[in-house]
Image: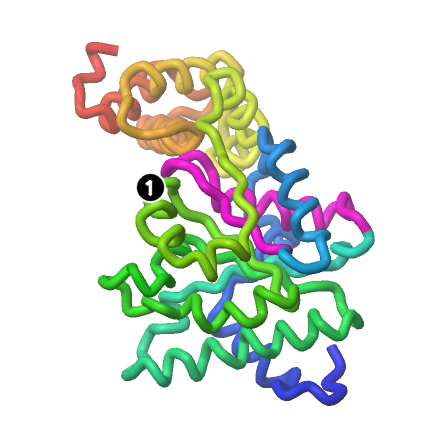
Amino acid sequence: MTSLSFHVSDDTLNDLIHRYTRDFTAQDLAGKFDPITGRDKELEHLTLVLLQRLRKNVMLLGPAGVGKTALFIGLAQLINANKVPKLLQGARVIELEMSMIGAGSSSRAELEGRLIPIIKGVAERNACGLFPPIIFCIDEIHQLMISFKTSSYSGIADLLKPFLTNGDLLVIGATTREEYDDYVKLEPAIDRRFQKIDLDVPSVEMTITILQNMKKNFEDHYGFGISDRAIKRIVVLTDRYIRNRNNPDKSIICLDQACAHATMKGVTTELDDESISIAIAGEAGISHMAI
């Protein structure tokens, strides 16, 4: 970046971004993430919104565990693979982590003193059009609404409002449909600046595909193979026995736990059925003998 006549200097902005945000594009380049699959339609819709001139902000809506925040990573992976239109090539996907911004602050003024320069610094660089855009991601965005009284970040969304209107910020928020209705929808000045994308719970078949595309990283980490049959067994059994949570999250957790159990037993060749049963039983709160 070059400072030009920006109100927030490059050094200040870069320091704030380093301290208080999470750069998904940089972390993906460093190999931190599993490949995101099964959300091509949603990622295409997300990209379409971000390309628009004015209301280029997205609200991802879906139940817990369906992979709303995985779309942040999926977008970063598309950008890094140069599979986005020219306007988004080289963009940075950065998560505003409110817990980090608020950590150690003794007052609301101190919190805002950290956040406002990040917002202004990014907005003025996006507005000048000389650099690839910076895209903000905000998980649990409902906590920033005035109506969410129990949050120390309540009302922070108002700081974003002026920049959301003119298109200088690109923001992707994520929340559940219930929390959207209870909090975001009550603030129409914020709500109308976002375009909504609904995320459904993936089917058993799609969840199997998602885990198959992730399994190499698990195999590399644990040092043994994971067959497609084992993947299918995990997904089918989690769908049957863990009814109060959603895929793909619950199947990914069970895959990881099954591999850990296998490692504890000294497995070195291939993930075994017993380890799968023990992991799923533990998450479901039943005896593994029942599986």
- Nearest the viewer among 177 and 70 is 177
Residues 243 and 148: in front is: 148
Q: Residue at x 40, y 19 (%)?
A: 234
Q: Is residue 67 magenta?
A: yes
Which range is magenta?
56-85
Label count reads 1
Residue 98: x, y in percent? 40, 66
From this view, report whether residue 100 is shown above or below residue 194.
below
Whether residue 69 is situated above or below residue 97 in the rendered picture: above
Colour option used: rainbow
Q: Secondary structure at mark 1?
A: helix
- In this rendering, would 7 be left or right of 241? right
Tell me which residue sits at (72%, 85%) in the image: 3
Q: Residue at x 64, y 40 (%)?
A: 45
Name the residue nearer the viewer: 126 or 191.
191
Q: Does residue 22 appear anywhere in the picture? A: yes
Does the magenta run of residues contain 223? no
- Is residue 263 at all visible to an observer of this figure? no
The type of residue carrying mark 1 is: Glu
Quadrant of the drawing holding the C terminus: top left
Q: Height in image: 210 above or below 89?
A: above
Residue 147, percent across and down? Answer: 30, 60
Residue 24 screen position, x and y as percent: 57, 55
Does 266 sit above or below residue 125? above
Q: Residues within 10 Å of mark 1 (few under 14, many from 20)?
A: few
Horizontal placement of 8 versus 177: left or right?
Answer: right
Q: What residue is disc 1 on?
A: 178
